[in-house]
Amino acid sequence: MPGVIFELVVLLVCFGVVGISIRAAKAGKVPKVRKIAALEGLPELVGRAAEMGSCVHFMTGAGGLNVPSYAAQATAGLSILGHVAELCGKYKVPIHYTCIYGYNIAIAQDLIRTGYLRGGHPELYRDDMIFYSGEHQYSYAPALMGFIMREKPAANMMFGEIMYETMNTIGAGAIAGSMQAAGTINKYYQCFLVSCCDFAMIGDELFAAAASLRGIPDELGGLRGADMIKMISLGLAALAIALASAGSDLFLQISKM
Amino acid sequence: MSASAKTWRTLTVLAFILPGLFILFARYTGIGQFMAARVVGWPVTLATFAIVLGVVTFVRTHSTLVIKREKYWPYNLVALLSFLLTFGMAFAYKPVYDYILTNVVQTLQIAFMGFIGFYNLTFFFHGTRRRTPEVGVLMVVSIFVMLWMAPIGEIISPIFPIVGQWLNDIPSGGAMRGFLICVAVGMILQYVRSVLGYERAWSGGAA
């Protein structure tokens, strides 16, 4: 298969760089991570719900763990759900998670139950905090809109593989007066998130947020590794552009190995 | 965490990591590719079985809300009856099931898509809450790009197609490529974290 050797080398370099960064962080060289506004804003959103005596709504979108290209985002979204559930436990705020897939029910129940436990109020957890809408976006989007218009949550959060149902949810949230936070890597929805949400994670900030939630040195080290890979990628892109401009197809040949 | 819970958690992480490593091994060595293709299909099968869990939760949640006469319980009753009728007819009497699919479900889907189209058109009006210069730039760019794509733009002024296409191809195209590189690296980081066992949100609460 053309390109497989190049692909393997890139993968090994990525694993190597991230591994070295994690090891360096474990040894004490913990990188400083800049504040992610949306992540910093989560306590504010939950606090608002507590002040208003309202609830928090959370969704991870129509993309699930069963599709390889969606799984990374869905996992990051679930990580943030666990963190938000802990905040809800701390502030004694009910959280409602709306999901499209059956397996998300069990995962979310466990995450929210543990979140409330860590927050100090396990008695507030109820199984019906997870709302299952059916396995299709046609049912998911109206269910989300209906839920938001009925419950009028003080905070509406959308993190993960969120698709067109996001626009319906954000629109309903705006009408219901919810404070909104969202994050996805789907490029087509960035403009909506940035312009219509109070807090938005742009692109891979979603992954960075998931990795820096607990502030563990190992995970922060991974973030530095990712930044180094970006630098390497940019360097290679500049090299490829320079070579192509000089009339050489060397980089193209290497990438087809 | 108790010892049994720890063992269970370790097994769960191994059940995630080992198939992933096997798929990578098969891809780069060519050994066991048939089996790897099967492994890739497992999540779909597992997700299909999980629908049963969803159905049980759906029926339990809605029936509890109806029995307790919670707020908006008639909506729950409609959802429950619709589900039971469709589910029952799929086994009991196929023509009614086909009728429901053709005349109710499909019609509702078409109506909903129409609603979404209108909703998207008016989305910025009721959704935008930030009044920043960046959002202003976004709105102006959107207008130019829309008038480039729509035939009426050229009729209004020949500038719209030229500026719209330039905005789409040069600044937007470049930004998108940079964005995709960062996102791809972020995804790699997420997978590396999962393989190393740092990311376990998918396995539930002890993540």
Image (spheres, coloured by chain):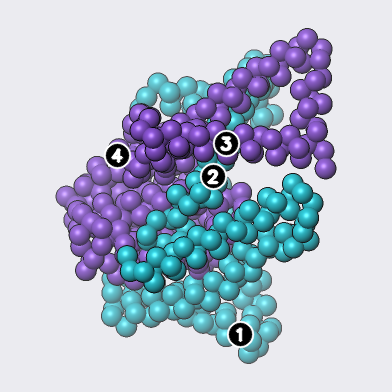
Q: Which chain is purple?
A: A
Mark 3 surroundings within 10 Å by alpha-carbon count, few (fewer than 14), some (14 through 19), many (20 or more): few
Quadrant location of the C terminus of chain B in the rendered image:
bottom left
Q: Which residue is mark 1?
A: B89
**Residue B174 sits above or below residue B48 on the image:** above
Which label sits in the foreground, 4 or 2?
2
Mark 4 surroundings within 10 Å by alpha-carbon count, few (fewer than 14), some (14 through 19), many (20 or more): some
Q: Going 30% across and 58% down the picture, which residue do you hit?
A: A115
Does A208 sit left or right of A121 as displayed?
Answer: right
Q: Position of residue A73 (x, y in %)?
A: 51, 47
Identity of the residue furthest to the front in this view = A27
Q: CA distance from mark 1 to mark 2?
A: 47 Å
Any part of residue B130 in sight = no
The tag earlier along the polypeptide, 1 or 2, is: 1
What residue type is disc 1 on? Met
Task: Identify the mark at residue B192; answer none if there is no mark.
Answer: 2
Q: Color used for chain B?
A: cyan
Identity of the residue furthest to the bottom in this view = B92
Q: Going 45% across and 37% down the picture, which residue do you hit?
A: A23
**Residue B138 sits above or below residue B55 on the image:** above
Q: Which residue is mark 3?
A: A16
Identity of the residue furthest to the left in this view = A51
Q: CA distance from mark 3 to mark 1?
A: 56 Å
Q: Relative to the observer, which residue lies in front, B38 or A108?
A: B38
Q: Which residue is mark 4?
A: A41
Mark 2, chain letter? B
Same chain, labels 3 and 1: no
Same chain, labels 4 and 1: no
Q: Relative to the observer, which residue lies in front, A148 or A200?
A: A200
What residue type is disc 2 on? Val
